[in-house]
Amino acid sequence: MAHLTAAPHRPLFLAGTLQTLLVILWWGFTLETRQYGTTLATLIPETAAHGWLMIYGLFPFFIFGFLFTALPNWVESGKIAQRDYLGSAGLMALGAGLFYPGLYVPYLAGIALILHALGWSIGLLALGRILRGARHPDMRQPWLAWAATAAGLAGALAFLGGVVLDSVPWMRAAMAIGAWGFLIPLFLAVCHRMIPWFTSRIVPNYVIVRPHGPLWAMVAASLCHGVMVVLELERWTWLIDLPSAGLAVWFIARWGIVPAMRERLLAMLHIGFVWSAVSLTLHGLDSLLAFAGAEYRLGLAPMHALGIGFFGSMLLAMASRVTLGHSGRPLKADALTWGLFWMVQLIALTRMLPDLLPGLIAYRAMNLAVLLWLATFGIWAWKYAPIYWRARADGKPG
């Protein structure tokens, strides 16, 4: 237990690792029983529950574990207090765990969501104290990461409101806030900060390119997209999605994806970011099809390119890097980790194809994507989870 609580990322990453398996186990069970007409009725719509689990019930554990570890180093400030990261981890884990039975037991889901939001609030306040006390000359990316995390709490509270009021529009708004106000701005802030810096440590004579103008433009476009989703104006989002995709392509080129391929752990970050451009392009094309009144649409393919391709790839890449680096192990992705990363790419494609090619690819591919996810993150958990309750390999504290 002493090792598990010795550093912020340890309890949070462990809880997040369990969630990567639980959320898909529940969704796979739901899909399978639905096909045979034996689904146990949930008190919250299944798709809304799936959305909450993927956005709010999974990623925040890794996000807070990462931010608690990285943000103090970014701004050259003090560390997160143990009571804060344990309180945040404990309440969020308790809330996420109770959410599953809460789908079937009256009032329990509301309690679960409140506990989860309290844990989130503790973490957000702790990060805010770190940032307010910092004296670093450039605080733009750290405050953007904090603001995105605050938007995530607002989205979680909106979902709570939807559950209490039995309001599908509130739940829909929560999903839009979670994707476009929380996760995309936060992942953009982290990528903008870390991909060029990590690349500069590997690639000789590398020049860091980190302009803030394109970053703010992409964040603004993401926020506008979220607002348009809430207002049901998706047929107009191509006006912002396609230019934003162009900026993502520009970052991909300027950050040097080709020379980054020489180091697996670095390549994982670059390849993960490519999915941001793919997803934004697909969102833009789908919006254009709606604008043109076309019968053919892309379904959920753009969202799964975002959720599995971009977020899932970056999650595995960043979690692996932090786990290795903060356990006294070499920052090298072995063949197994590299293979698991490519499995995530396969999962994204497997889940997208039934929507892109509905006449050719059977929707049983969704079940295959579930199995691949469980296999991939099950193996990743087997390899990495024990590190969280063991001492550092180099004998150092933390």
Image (tube, helix red, strand yellow):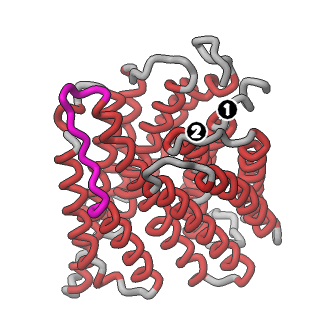
Q: Which mark is residue 366?
A: none
**Residue beneath label 1, please?**
7
Residue 173: x %, y % from top left: 54, 78
Q: Give the vertical position of 224 relative to 191 (above or below).
A: below
394 or 172: which is nearer to us?
394
The kind of residue on which mark 1 rests is Ala
Q: Main secondary structure of the magenta part?
A: loop
- Name the residue rendered at 62%, 37% in the picture: 9
Crowd rating for badge 2 (residues with CA inside 10 Å; few <14, some 14–19, many 20+): some
**Residue beneath label 2, please?**
69
Crowd rating for badge 1 (residues with CA inside 10 Å; few <14, some 14–19, many 20+): many
Say left or right for 316 vs 133: left
Magenta segment: 201-214
Residue 385: x %, y % from top left: 61, 28
* Image quadrant assignment for residue 36: bottom right
- Name the residue rendered at 43%, 61% in the picture: 185
Residue 323: x %, y % from top left: 54, 29
Q: Quadrant of the C terminus?
A: top right
The kind of residue on which mark 2 rests is Thr
Element at label 1: loop
* Image quadrant assignment for residue 297: bottom left
Element at label 2: helix
User: Residue 145 colored magenta?
Assistant: no
Say left or right for 108 vs 117: right
Q: How many marks?
A: 2
Say left or right for 98 vs 238: right
The reply to whether callout 1 and callout 2 are in contact (CB within 8 Å) is yes
* Image quadrant assignment for residue 307: bottom left
- Name the residue rendered at 38%, 46% in the picture: 193
Mark closest to the chain's N terminus, 1 or 2: 1
